[in-house]
Image: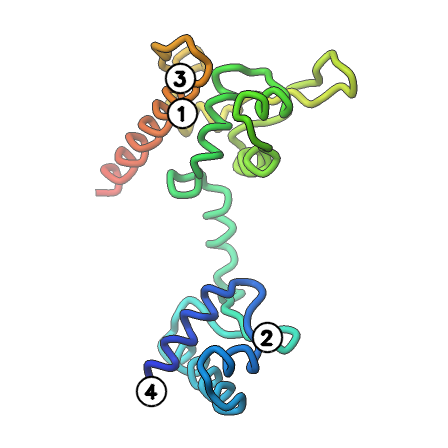
């Protein structure tokens, strides 16, 4: 197989492997190569990335190769992490956000009852993006946390107050949830286009 193609395949494999990475032996087994030759390919690919000034590099951690970003770029990644965008809000996150927005204050248990699935991860993601926050404790066994939307939520969706949320037409809980989620998505989509237009 062509040398450049082998390096390209390795780059894709390391990208797909994520934080776990791949060892020299694993790469050799996948590509049916000698382990030492696989190591040479990785080293050569690493030099290519550095020479071309690419945004990623290859690091060896616990005998495994993995793709990592450059430490000096960290401030930009942090800025991205705290900037909610349409791409970063998954369907689960948008669905959870619509439940909180339209039914706040609300507990995690109530959110999960409406969605029918566990929502810890979605709630954690929304809290980290400052779109929802703890607003109190429910008067129930265990005093569960009550969640509500934040000022950042209003700012990001271009709302003066929570009362400005569009009213769903449906009364059925499941239909209303789908409609509310879609309305938030459309508002987010429109908000994103407005930002893009301002850049022009």
x and y percentages locating residue 175 in the rendered image: 40, 17
Within 10 Å of the Cα at label 3, are there few (<14), some (14-19), or many (20+) other Cα atoms?
few
Which of the two discs, 3 and 1, labels the residue nearer the N terminus?
A: 3
Quarter-of-image position of residue 187? top left
Residue at (39% x, 80% y) in the render: 7
Above or below — where is 164 with respect to 26? above
Badge 4 or badge 3: first in the primary sequence: 4
Front residue of 129 and 28: 28
Q: CA distance from mark 1 to mark 4?
A: 49 Å
Mark 1 or 2, nearer chain start: 2
Residue placed under numbered mark 4 in the picture:
1
Query: Disc 1, disc 2: CB below 8 Å?
Result: no
User: Residue beneath label 1, please?
Assistant: 181
In the picture of the structure, the residue carrying the numbered disc 3 is 175
Residue plotted at (41% across, 16% down): 176
Disc number lying in front (2 or 3): 3
- Secondary structure at badge 4 equals loop
Depth-wise, is mark 1 or mark 4 nearer the camera? Answer: 4
Gap in angstroms between the C-alphas marked 4 and 3 = 54 Å
Name the residue at the right extreme: 142
Instruction: For the residues labelled 4 and 3, say whether their Cβ atoms are less than 8 Å apart.
Output: no
Closer-to-camera residue (198/10) = 10
User: Pointers 3 and 1 in contact (CB under 8 A)?
Assistant: no
The residue tagged 2 is 64
């Amino acid at each position: 197989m062509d040398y450049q193609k082998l390096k390209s395949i390795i780059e894709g494999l390391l990208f797909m492997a994520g934080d776990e990475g791949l060892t020299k032996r694993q790469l050799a087994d996948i590509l049916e190569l000698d382990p030492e030759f696989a190591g040479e390919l990785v080293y050569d690919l690493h030099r290519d990335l550095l020479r071309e000034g690419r945004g990623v590099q290859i690091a060896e951690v616990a005998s495994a190769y993995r793709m990592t970003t450059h430490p000096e770029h960290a401030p930009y990644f942090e800025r991205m992490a705290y900037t909610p965008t349409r791409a970063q809000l998954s369907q689960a996150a948008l669905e959870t956000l619509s439940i909180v927005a339209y039914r706040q204050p609300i507990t995690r248990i109530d959110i999960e009852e409406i969605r029918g699935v566990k929502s810890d991860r979605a709630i954690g993601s929304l809290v980290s993006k400052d779109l929802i926050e703890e607003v109190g404790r429910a008067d129930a066994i265990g005093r569960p946390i009550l969640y509500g939307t934040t000022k950042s939520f209003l700012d990001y969706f271009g709302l003066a107050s929570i009362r400005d949320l569009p009213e769903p037409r449906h009364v059925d809980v499941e239909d209303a949830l789908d409609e509310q989620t879609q309305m938030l998505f459309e508002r987010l989509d429109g908000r994103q286009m407005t930002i893009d237009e301002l850049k022009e």
